[in-house]
Amino acid sequence: MSNNNFLYGGQAVIEGVMIRGIKRATLAVRKPNGDIVKRSIPLESWANSKLRNLFLIRGVLVLFETLIIGTKALTYSASEAAEEEDSSEMSKVAIIIMISISLIFGLSFFFLLPLFLSSLADSVFSNDFLANIIEGIVRLFLFIGYIFFIGRMNDIKRVFGYHGAEHMTVHCMESKKTLRYDNIINFSPAHPRCGTSFLLTVVFLSILIFILIPREPAWLLISSRIFLIPVITSVSYEFIRFTGKYDNFGTKILSLPNLFLQKLTTNFPDKEMIEVSIVAMEYAIAIDNDEVNPEDNKFVPA
């Protein structure tokens, strides 16, 4: 896979940025003393398999890979930002536990809770279509409300600043401009391939799909909210991939709700945040071009 065809992306972490490259994920973190350190994160053996190119299948694959890399990156960055001595490799058991907790919370709060709340109105409306619409509206409000309230926390505000820096750096790289501060600040903190956009697409698509599911029997209603999630995830990924790959009037219109929501999850970064993001991106590109031999399981000075 050439660098020209690969879609670089990443995520914000504690005082840093993670970038997913072709061969490795890279992580750059600013320490309390102001120094920037970096490390690479090996990809899972299946991460670049042929399955990643299969339509629909790749959506679920990318989701799980993102959860694994994101969990590692958040843990490593938190340890380094706090200057803890031990930032060693996480065990697979620890990763599975953390991801399982995240999935259970997401499923319960954003899918089963709206279903329960909307079921309280079933006797009032006695209309499956309307009840499913209400469920979707509740899910949408819970999602936006959750993002809004966590965004009021000071620590999360800084993460959202790094989120903006990551997007602006990706924009700059995709525009084939030199990765330096003076260029990057001219780009938007919003990006159509953002994870926030993906999640909002999942919410909207779930509304369209779930309105077709009857409210009875109960086992069908509940199981549909669980077992249709991989389908919704896959279609949502393809939508985000499509709107992020093509820049035209149609894709811009389709991306408007997602880009608008990113006003809640991205802040305009300061210069120091952008510097960290540049380190992460340049390290990923250097590894992909075989310009450096990445260090395993430890941070090195940037």
Image (cartoon, rainbow, N blue to C red):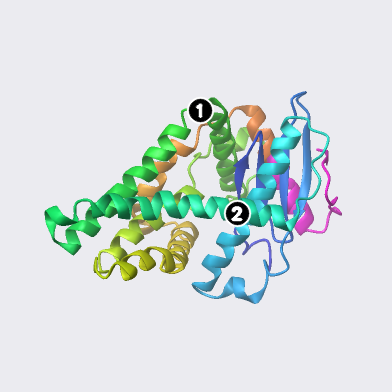
The amino acid beneath tag 1 is Met
Q: Nearer the viewer, residue 288 or 79?
A: 79
Circle 2 Cα neighbour tier, 10 Å, few/some/many (<14 / 14–19 / ≥20): some
**In the rendered image of this protein, does residue 302 appear above or below residue 253?**
above
Start and end of the magenta stretch? 278-302
Q: Secondary structure at mark 1?
A: loop
Q: Amino acid at mark 2?
A: Ile
Q: Where on the picture, by quarter, is residue 181?
A: top right
- Compared with 209, 133 (above or below) is above
Q: Is residue 292 magenta?
A: yes
* Quadrant (top left, top right, bottom left, bottom right) of the C terminus: top right
Which residue shows up at 32% across the image and 51% down it?
Answer: 114
Which residue is under mark 2? 99
Residue 151 drawn at (x, y percent) = 47, 32
Give the left or right position of residue 277, taking residue 290 as reference.
left
Where does residue 33 sit, x and y in percent of width and height?
77, 23
Q: Mark 1 near mark 2, Cβ–Cβ under 8 Å?
A: no
